[in-house]
Amino acid sequence: MGHDFLLGGDWILIVLVMLGAVPEVAASWQFLLVAGHFWRNDYDVCAPVFPRTAVLIPAWNEAAVIAASIDRLMSLEYPREALRVYLVDDASTDETPQVAKAKEAQYPGSVIHLRREKGGQGKAHTLNHGLAVILDDEWMEALLITDADVIFQADSLRKMTRHLADPHVGAVTAYIKEGSRPGNYMTRFIGYEYITAQAASRRGQNVLGATACLAGGAQLHTRENLLALGGRIDTSSLAEDTFTTFQTQLNGRRVVFEPHAIVWAEEPGSIIGLWKQRLRWARGNVQVTKRYRKLWFRPHRGHRLGSVTFGVFWFCLFLQPIFMILSSFSLVTLYFASYAGAWHTFHVLWITNAVTYFFITAFSLLIDPPIARHTWRQGMMFPGVVNLGIVLYTCVPPLFRDLAHDAFAASHFSPDHALLTGGLLFIYAWPAVSMPVACLAKVAEPRRFGWFLSPLVVYVVGYGSLLCACTFASYVKELRGAEMKWDKTEKTGKMVVPT
Amino acid sequence: MGQDREDGEDGGPDVTIEAVGAGPRVVFRREINDAVRYEKGLFIKALVILAILAIVLVLRTLYFA
């Protein structure tokens, strides 16, 4: 069992174990910044401005959704003469061209259909095709880049453009909400995730003065910002929106998140769909991290991307799987070096996790109550049944001891030492083990009883572990230099959006 | 306010700011006030959660440690 006092090496292990709590603590810090958004925001420099805005929509086989999207854009509370929609059809093989032509005829002069005969090169290439046409004309003062399935609430665009009254602002992004109704367990997990990743994180980034990413489905740029970016979108990565966001800030312009400009999008309803989408995003983040390697943790007068706080936020998300693996491995090692040391460290780690879980979950649900009413179960279950069990155990150990005692007494079963040791080591290793287990949900989904097994596994291991597994897979893909494939998320048009 | 981005070079906005009527300005002001009020509400919510968390931690330390 090892000795019960700590040596120098044990302290190193304890520090490594506590690394497992760092991403959650950093996330809590970001949530605390949210509380400061009432004080540090851009509303005092806003004005009711309505620049001539071109809306750029890249579309490949979007016949199911594009008509509704254009109709919603045309009914925005925005001067019609100051709004044009450019639909770039990336060599679609479905009815997208016909739908686009019909909308062009319905809204003459306001909807323009552009067609690429040779497509399939990815979203950035499609955007650049449209950008070349739009920038060629002096008419455009602001450009809204969106996706074919995204539905804008009537007041969303003018709530975004009001920030362009500030000459320091180069781009504005909106709050994207998941709009599938009734949806399924997966779209609800994503709906909750977007409260944390957008409504909360991006408010925090507003306060910090550094934004990680303009939402791909709702990014508004000034013409000057686009020209400073070279008049084109980066095509060398899978995260063109993050590159654009970083470059905008490196050029000395600010990027603002407007939480009250709301747009709705249909997100994947299956693990396989989610995996494709998140693998693309995570690989893009690996590429951004490498491309801007000289930026991190180097404070700069012109922007806040190099600040320590922003670096911590970025790397806590980027390296979360590594933190989890290191933490679990160190705790198991510590168990063999110092049983008591491991036990106490385990408690400190998980009480920290419990505190951050409670704070983040409760605050997330209160940040966006309408979405919370739809997704609160998934919000509570975000860490998974096993992690919640460990949290409860570390918070109220006597309760669990009594329950276990009663259960064993009732079943006339007395666990031996080997079983208890195995159980304890399993719990110590769980944060790392949960990632490969989460992959089982993806494996099970298309198989027999997948409709039942796959959600079951996600609820047991947690949606967070599933995302970590995906991030880990992105490391592997990048290390192997796998082909950059643009796996499009399938859209069905089954969104119900409040009017 | 300026016209057609000309102000951009001397620190003005990069977009056209046309004179808007009193109606849009009233709506704009109301929406800004609503937004700031919502953000202040988030500050209060965060404080309430932190207070509850502190109470739970004290109770846990006293009765369930």
Image: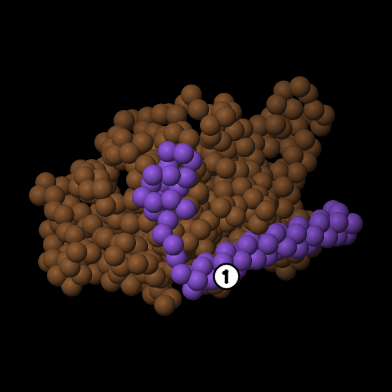
- Seen from the viewer's position, the closer of residues A136 and A196 is A136
**Considering the image in quadrants, where does the N terminus of chain A appear?**
top right
- Seen from the viewer's position, the closer of residues A1 and A346 is A346
Q: Position of residue A107 (x, y in %)?
A: 20, 70
Q: Position of residue B44 (x, y in %)?
A: 73, 63
Residue A184 visible here: no
For badge 1, the amino acid type reads: Arg
Q: Is residue B50 above or below residue A228?
A: below
Q: Residues within 10 Å of mark 1 (few under 14, many from 20)?
A: few
Quarter of the rendering containing residue A66: bottom left
Q: Which chain is home to disc 1? A: B
Q: Is residue A104 above or below residue A141?
A: below
Residue A356 visible here: yes
Q: Residue at x 26, y 60 (%)?
A: A85
**In the rendered view, does A117 fall on the left or right side of A474?**
left
**In the rendered view, does B44 fall on the left or right side of A286?**
right
Q: Residue at x 56, y 53 (%)?
A: A45
Q: Secondary structure at mark 1?
A: helix
**Considering the image in quadrants, where does the C terminus of chain A appear?**
bottom left
Q: Residue furthest bottom?
A: A499
Q: Residue at x 46, y 69 (%)?
A: B21
Q: Mark 1 = which residue?
A: B30
Q: Residue at x 16, y 59 (%)?
A: A113
Q: Colour of chain A?
A: brown
**In the rendered view, does A471 fall on the left or right side of A280?**
right
Q: Position of residue A293 (x, y in %)?
A: 47, 26
**In the rendered view, does A112 fall on the left or right side of A402?**
left
Q: Position of residue A447 (x, y in %)?
A: 32, 60
Q: Residue furthest left?
A: A117
Q: Colour of chain B?
A: purple
- Seen from the viewer's position, the closer of residues A459 and A263 is A263
